[in-house]
């Protein structure tokens, strides 16, 4: 019995040692494989990624194109900067210094006139209209058609934004009525325009006022015209016969 117990004890201990070896051997082999893989991977890294070790690192094609794109961007920006430098660095300002005394400065606003030669041509064409001619001859006292009011007609043509061929006889009377509405304190004379166009009938007056409203809206409600602008308009063609219609010279 004692011999059998000793043999069982020996086999049991021997089995435990074998299991222990079995558990330890895979770990050591795995560690060995890890070290081998790490050494192999290190060699592969050294072979595949020489840029990390070389003094002149290589650049991947994608990155190289990106760098070249950035370079092109810098070149384009430098070219655009050179173009900007060629432009006028000081844009024109609508205000000019008129006088300068000590710390006081007087500014004078530059006038920007939008009247183009085609607007003068439209006005000259409408002056040849037989109805417009009869109206100007009918207004002998220049109550509604002196030279300043007629200059405002050209100014309104330039602001309405229509094509030259679109201006008709009615636009002349719309602009002239609006000029009288803006400049004349006495509103009675402008009723002569209705009397000349429609006689004693009032049926067409609502349509006229509707067209007048549309005409003002096409100008962006910009209906004020200065005396300087009127004089500037008259200097374009000073020989035009309507500029002789001066109310101050009329007896």
Image: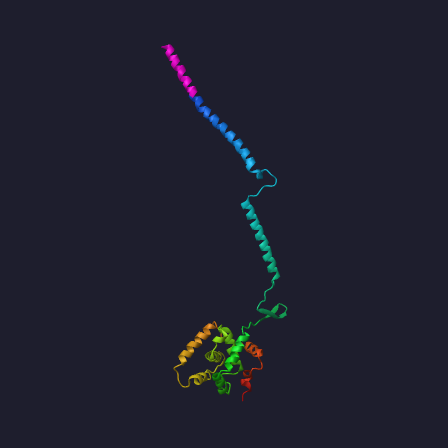
Question: Dividing the picture into quarters, in which one does residue 106 lie?
Answer: bottom right
The residue most toward the bottom is 251
* Residue 94, placed above or below residue 76: below
Magenta residues (range): 1-18
Whether residue 65 sits left or right of residue 7 in the image: it is right
Q: Could one spot residue 224 in this view of the protein? A: no
Residue at the (40%, 78%) spot, across then down: 207
Q: Nearer the viewer, residue 45 or 78?
A: 45
Q: Position of residue 68 (x, y in %)?
A: 57, 49
Asked whether residue 3 is drawn in magenta, I would say yes
Residue at the (43%, 76%) spot, across then down: 211
Q: Nearer the viewer, residue 60 or 120?
A: 60
Residue at the (53%, 77%) spot, across then down: 121
Q: Quadrant of the N terminus?
A: top left
Q: Position of residue 134 (x, y in %)?
A: 48, 86
Q: Quadrant of the C terminus?
A: bottom right
Q: Could one spot residue 207 in this view of the protein? A: yes
Residue at the (52%, 79%) spot, across then down: 123
Asked whether residue 35 is drawn in magenta, I would say no
Question: Dividing the picture into quarters, in which one does residue 113 lie?
Answer: bottom right
The residue most toward the right is 102
Q: Position of residue 44 (x, y in %)?
A: 54, 34
Q: Position of residue 38 (x, y in %)?
A: 52, 32
């Amino acid at each position: 019995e004692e011999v059998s117990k000793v043999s069982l004890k020996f086999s049991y201990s021997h089995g435990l040692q074998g299991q222990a070896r079995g558990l330890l051997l895979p770990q050591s082999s795995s560690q060995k494989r890890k070290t081998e893989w790490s050494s192999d991977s290190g060699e592969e890294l050294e072979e595949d990624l020489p840029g990390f070790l070389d003094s002149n690192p290589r650049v991947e094609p994608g990155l190289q194109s990106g760098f070249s794109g950035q370079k092109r961007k810098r070149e384009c920006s430098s070219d655009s900067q050179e173009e900007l430098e060629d432009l006028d660095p000081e844009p024109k300002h609508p205000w000019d210094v008129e006088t300068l005394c000590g710390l006081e400065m007087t500014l004078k606003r530059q006038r920007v006139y939008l009247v183009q030669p085609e607007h003068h041509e439209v006005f000259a064409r409408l002056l040849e209209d037989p109805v417009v001619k009869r109206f100007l001859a009918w207004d002998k006292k220049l109550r509604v058609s002196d030279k300043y009011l007629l200059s405002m007609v050209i100014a309104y043509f330039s602001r309405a934004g229509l094509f030259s061929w679109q201006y008709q006889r009615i636009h002349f009377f719309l602009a002239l009525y609006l000029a009288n509405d803006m400049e004349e304190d006495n509103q009675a004379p402008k009723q002569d325009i209705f009397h000349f166009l429609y006689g004693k009938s009032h049926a067409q007056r609502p349509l006229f006022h509707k067209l007048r409203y549309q005409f003002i809206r096409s100008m962006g409600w910009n209906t004020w015209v200065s005396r300087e602008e009127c004089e500037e308009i008259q200097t374009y063609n000073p020989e035009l016969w309507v500029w002789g219609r001066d109310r101050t010279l009329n007896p």
